[in-house]
Amino acid sequence: MDLSVAIGSTTLSNPVGVASGTFGYGSEYEDLIDFSAIGALYTKAVTLAPRPGNDMPRIVETPSGILNSIGLANVGVERFLSEKMPYCARLPCAIIVNVAGASIDEYGMVVDRLEGSDAISGYEINISCPNVKHGGMAFGTDPATVTDLTANLRKRTKRPLIVKLTPNVTDIALIARAAQDGGADAVSCINTLVGMVIDVSAKRPVLPLRTGGLSGPAIRPIGVAATFAVSRAVAIPVIGVGGIASGNDALEYLLAGASAIQIGTANFVDPSTAAQVLAGIRAFAEREKMTCIKDFHQFIPR
């Protein structure tokens, strides 16, 4: 049984990844996880200059999930390369760097700097963060902008480009096709949904920016439906994200058409979730006598 997944010129050893923003730069989890059990680490977002992020509080619990407003807080590309990549380079899994920016030029400059590191397996382009004031989701809601940004980055690198899609649009398949038209090698589907929690006693929203990104089990059915639609609209791999906490959760995405998956919020609850999810996928594949990831896609008609 071969559970490897090809994303452009990179091959992941298995379909299980840990999602950007939930696993830091990897070192935060070094005593809690066997990195050989995951196919890819999607790093915390990297921007051109350091970002302090949004004001506190940044996270609030909700039924079956959390609402976050981190604001892409990160050390910036220079410190990422000097302080974080040396550790990442030693890991046995693929390193996919999540890239964010406030303009097309800024995205490009980040990728240009990252190109100097041989240990990077690809880039996940964050066009879908709902809790930053500039950039973020604004890039992911207009098809023409998505194509332009992707095409610009495609000229700068031969490494895999994975475009992370926002669900906060009317037609996510349209955005996915725009990414494919620009030269994307894959799409991540989905990022968080816009949500709000109000402190009734204080009579105001809990988060300083009022809204944040909803993640966790509550959004899984939305992610699965989006993956189903997107996988039938594009010819490139779809990476399913949203509310995965078990092998069965991951199997929903794979059966819907995903070629790989990412685990996000569940990492905060149990850092060993990735290993458990991989074991669940493998057990199912063995029972069904599958030989590769594509075999998951044969059950639900396109």
Image (tube, grey):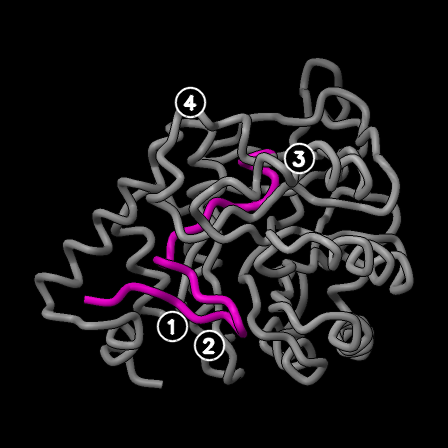
Q: Which of 299 and 277 lies nearest the eye of the viewer?
A: 277
Task: Tell me the distance, in whole angstroms, between the alpha carbons under discs 4 and 3.
Answer: 16 Å
Mark 3, Cα crowd under 10 Å, few <14 / some 14-19 / many 20+, is some
Residue at the disc numbered 4:
31
Q: Is residue 240 left or right of residue 78?
A: left
Majority SS type along the magenta span: loop
Residue at the disc numbered 2:
231
Task: Tell me the distance, in whole angstroms, between the alpha carbons under discs 1 and 4.
Answer: 33 Å
Q: Are marks 2 and 1 in contact (CB under 8 Å)?
A: yes
**4 vs 2, front mark:** 4
Where in the figure is residue 198, as x and y percent of width and height? 68, 27
- The magenta region covers 1-24
SS at circle 1? loop
Q: Is residue 200 left or right of residue 7?
A: right
Residue at the disc numbered 1:
257
- Which numbered tag is attached to residue 90? none
Residue drawn at x 35%, y 42% as measured from the top left = 274
SS at circle 2? helix
Q: Quadrant of the N terminus?
A: bottom left
First in sequence: mark 3 or mark 2?
A: 3
The verdict on residue 110 being magenta is no
The kind of residue on which mark 2 rests is Ser
Where in the figure is residue 78, as x and y percent of width and height? 82, 40
Residue at the disc numbered 3:
84
The verdict on residue 23 being magenta is yes
Where in the figure is residue 235, as x and y percent of width and height? 50, 84
First in sequence: mark 1 or mark 4?
A: 4
Residue drawn at x 17%, y 63% as measured from the top left = 285
Task: Tell me the distance, in whole angstroms, between the alpha carbons under discs 1 and 3.
Answer: 33 Å
Q: Is residue 40 above or below residue 239?
A: above
